[in-house]
Amino acid sequence: MKKKDLVYICSPLSAPTEQGIRKNMEKASYYANLVSNFIGCRAIAPHSFLPEYLDDNVPEEREAALDFGLSVLRLSKAIIVCGSRISSGMKGEIKMARELNIPAYALVEYAGGITFAKITQEERMDEVPICKGNFL
């Protein structure tokens, strides 16, 4: 990843409550800012703002939001997987990135800062730990 590259932030949106969804939107925005500031890239998390405009409970609006996100992913130089679980939406994004040969990285936060682990193999594509990787 280089300065000014467009990178896609992949993190969970789904949650059992509206408050949980709002919290996940805020986390997505946090991840985008964190990655942008650390690398100097243009990190985008469409799910940090699209739910403000498109209702995920209306099938046509959910489809439009997913299509928008995947269009942005196609333009991206990398996908950054954030958080401690992989939702069904994230699974689709990771699969598309793999099909498009877009490099995937896991954001790893620790007490002293952050780093990125290059994703070489997903252990599971469900709601549990993300991946095996080689630290950069």
Image: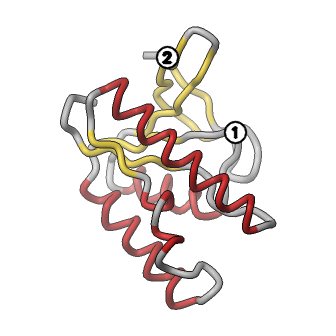
Residue lying at the far right of the rendered structure: 16
Expressed as whole percent of the image width and height from the top left, the position of residue 115 reads: 48, 19
Which quadrant of the view contains residue 39? top left
Q: In this view, does 56 lie above or below 25?
A: below
Quadrant assignment for the C terminus = top left
Helix or strand or loop: what does disc 2 sit on?
A: strand
Colour scheme of the picture: secondary structure
Expressed as whole percent of the image width and height from the top left, the position of residue 59 reads: 58, 89
Which quadrant of the view contains residue 34? top left
Say few, some or many: other residues with alpha carbon within 10 Å of mark 1 (under 14 / 14 to 19 / 20 or more). Answer: some
Mark 1 or 2, nearer chain start: 1
Whether residue 31 sits left or right of residue 74 in the image: it is right
Helix or strand or loop: what does disc 1 sit on?
A: loop
Q: Which residue is drawn at 74% across and 58% down?
A: 20
Gap in angstroms between the C-alphas marked 1 and 2: 17 Å
Which quadrant of the view contains residue 38? top left
Q: Name the residue under label 2.
A: 135
Expressed as whole percent of the image width and height from the top left, the position of residue 73 reads: 35, 57
Give the amino acid at mark 1. Ser
- The disc at residue 84 is 1
